[in-house]
Image (cartoon, rainbow, N blue to C red):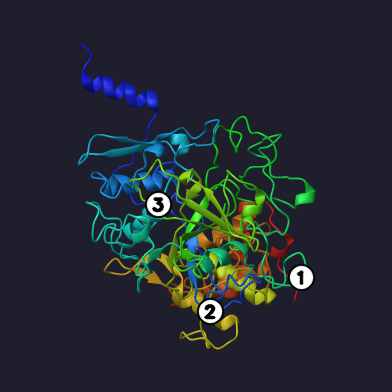
């Protein structure tokens, strides 16, 4: 006899559904699901573009990717067992591709009110969630701000946090002027200027656009030439060598010329996975700010009208052409009453002096999250860790005089105490290495120990044989701190100078110096180790004549 449980298992296997575990952290998703990641947007106080947009007075961070379907499914499982404010849209359950272009994101709702659960097909998990209105997006970031709680939709879960929504669902309620970003918000929808800066501003090379006239590109792929969609014509998931006419790696998912018999991506979907165009990033490192899905901002649009009709969306989508990806193009969309799923909202867009009205639905809108940034001294690349990568970046700045990334490099005036002095020099590198870098060593209470010495390539708090072995392994071929480059502020080679530096601090432990070998003894020992590791090694290790 076949039980109901067996039937349920067979159905689940047939649908190939993935059910994220309730309580899973969207910043550390399991398996192949992408986590919510951010890139730092620094250079506070940058000038605005000729459009008047893009100037932001402070540093912040923005999502590297759009919010994925798997991440939104986790949100639903946490707060929508009873879906008070209709965060789930029945259109979401539709297939990722249909001939009319109304592809859903394949989130399936199961159960009944008070006991709903949500699942998503694996091949849709890393694609962006769509069919989300502004209220859905605002409630998602409220949930992030509140540390991803599990519970009913209300204060402390979805209704307070970055935005005080307090049950707002109608267009009029969601457009109320009182719904603004709250002080102390940790996660939020980007303002239009924050979104614009992350997409078009070039933080490294002033005047880097094609005309050499300003610090902004026209498209969010670091180009003034419109992107192409290589899925039209020959599609190769591994190909990145696009036509030279369009510039290297200038691609996006959007509606190009002609009819796409198999979606916009060539793999049976209208949208790409959020990390797909990894070589067509914005200058700051965001992906798919152009195409894929248009993204909500927190700003009201057309505020010169008596009543603002909606919120600004930007970036274009799979459903429209390249023009909508331009920096001078934006659209305004009514936030949407979630109870009116069958009624198209008002859609307005601008890029010319005129304003256009049209019907729209939410198949083409998604979410990109912004985050308040709290700078951590020493975390030059703002990845949440102070490690060898930060040492490499600091050394590169000192060596070349050019900041390799936007970040805070000015750490110390004397190498022993913190404080900026306006110069990026060895004092900053010394302070980073000796006081800020995090090692794997711990103190008696189990707390991580910060600071080490030059030569601690594995950052275990000790300069010992393991570090010498690592240097020997990469002698003559490596270039980074982790490979044995102790003097990256001088060169990118791993050679005698690095071995000498290692010898100077050999035996040191977390900034202290213990038994250090006599230099010539260490040099001979190091050359011997390198010779064993490299079977002959480099001629630089031969003892020099006096």
Q: Residue at x 69, y 46 (%)?
A: 228
- Quote the CA–CA distance across marks 3 and 1: 41 Å
Near mark 3 (Cα within 10 A), the count class, few <14, some 14-19 or many ≥20, is many
Q: Is 284 on the left or on the right of 176, as rendered?
A: right
Q: Residue at x 45, y 74 (%)?
A: 375
Near mark 2 (Cα within 10 A), the count class, few <14, some 14-19 or many ≥20, is many
Q: Position of residue 453 (x, y in %)?
A: 49, 73
Name the residue that disc number 3 marks: 336
Which numbered circle lies on residue 212? 1
Q: Position of residue 151 (x, y in %)?
A: 22, 51
Q: Quadrant of the rendered structure where residue 528 is?
A: bottom right
Q: Are marks 3 and 1 in contact (CB under 8 Å)?
A: no
The quarter of the image holding the N terminus is top left
Q: Element at badge 2?
A: helix
Query: Is label 3 or label 1 in front?
Result: 3
The quarter of the image holding the C terminus is bottom right
Query: Is label 1 or label 2 in front?
Result: 1
Nearer to the camera, 394 or 308: 308
Name the residue that disc number 2 marks: 430
Q: Quadrant of the rendered structure where residue 224 is?
A: bottom right
Whether 464 is drawn above or below 103: the answer is: below
Q: Are marks 2 and 3 in contact (CB under 8 Å)?
A: no
In the rendered image, is residue 461 in sight? no
- The answer to which of marks 1 and 2 sits earlier in the sequence is 1
Q: Residue at x 58, y 33 (%)?
A: 267
- Quote the CA–CA distance across marks 2 and 3: 55 Å
Q: Position of residue 36 (x, y in %)?
A: 43, 54
Q: How many marks?
A: 3
Whether 367 is drawn above or below 485: the answer is: above
Q: Element at badge 1?
A: loop
Q: Element at badge 3?
A: loop
Q: Position of residue 338 (x, y in %)?
A: 35, 48
């Amino acid at each position: 006899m076949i039980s109901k449980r067996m039937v349920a298992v067979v159905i689940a296997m047939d649908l190939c559904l993935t059910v994220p575990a309730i309580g899973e952290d969207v910043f550390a998703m399991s398996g192949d699901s992408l986590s919510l990641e951010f890139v730092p947007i620094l250079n506070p106080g940058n000038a605005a573009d000729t459009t008047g947009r893009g100037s932001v007075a402070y540093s912040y961070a923005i999502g590297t990717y759009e919010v994925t379907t798997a991440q939104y499914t986790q949100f639903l499982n946490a707060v929508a067992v009873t879906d008070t404010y209709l965060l789930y849209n029945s259109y979401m359950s539709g297939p990722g591709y249909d001939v009319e272009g109304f592809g859903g994101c394949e989130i399936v709702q199961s159960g009944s009110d008070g006991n709903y659960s949500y699942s998503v097909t694996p091949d849709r998990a890393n694609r962006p969630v769509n069919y989300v209105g502004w209220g859905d997006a605002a409630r998602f970031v409220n949930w992030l701000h509140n540390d991803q709680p599990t519970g009913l939709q209300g204060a402390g879960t979805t209704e307070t946090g970055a935005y005080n929504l307090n049950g707002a669902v109608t267009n009029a309620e969601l457009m109320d002027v009182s719904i603004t970003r709250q002080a102390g918000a940790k996660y939020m929808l980007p303002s239009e200027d924050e979104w614009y800066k992350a997409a078009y501003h070039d933080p490294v090379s002033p005047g880097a656009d094609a005309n050499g006239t300003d610090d902004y590109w026209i498209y969010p792929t670091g180009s003034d030439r419109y992107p192409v969609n290589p899925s039209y014509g020959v599609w190769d998931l591994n190909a990145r060598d696009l036509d030279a006419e369009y510039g290297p790696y200038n691609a996006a998912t959007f509606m190009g010329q002609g009819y796409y018999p198999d979606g916009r991506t060539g793999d049976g979907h209208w949208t790409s996975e959020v990390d797909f165009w990894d070589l067509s990033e914005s200058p700051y490192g965001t992906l798919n700010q152009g195409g894929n899905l248009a993204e909500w901002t927190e700003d009201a649009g057309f505020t010169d009208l008596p009543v603002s009709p909606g919120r600004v969306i930007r970036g274009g989508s799979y459903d429209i052409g390249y023009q909508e990806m331009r920096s001078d193009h934006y659209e305004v969309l009514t936030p949407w009453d979630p109870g009116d799923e069958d009624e198209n909202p008002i859609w307005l867009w601008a890029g010319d002096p005129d304003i256009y009205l049209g019907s729209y639905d939410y198949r083409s809108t998604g979410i990109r999250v912004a985050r308040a940034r709290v700078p951590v001294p020493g975390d030059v690349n703002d990845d949440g860790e102070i490690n060898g990568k930060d040492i490499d970046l600091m050394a590169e700045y000192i060596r070349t005089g050019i900041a390799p990334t936007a970040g805070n490099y000015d750490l110390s005036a004397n190498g022993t105490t913190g404080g900026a002095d306006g110069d990026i020099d060895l004092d900053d590198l010394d302070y980073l290495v000796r006081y800020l870098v995090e090692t794997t060593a711990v103190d008696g209470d189990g707390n991580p120990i910060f600071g080490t010495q030059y030569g601690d390539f594995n950052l275990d708090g000790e300069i010992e044989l393991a570090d010498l072995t690592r240097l020997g392994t990469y002698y003559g071929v490596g270039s980074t701190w982790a490979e044995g480059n102790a003097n990256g502020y001088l060169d990118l080679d791993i050679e005698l100078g690095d071995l000498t530096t290692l010898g100077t601090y050999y035996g040191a432990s977390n900034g202290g110096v213990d038994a250090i070998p006599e230099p010539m003894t260490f040099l001979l020992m190091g050359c011997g180790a390198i010779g064993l590791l490299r079977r002959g090694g480099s001629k630089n290790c031969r003892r020099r004549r006096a």
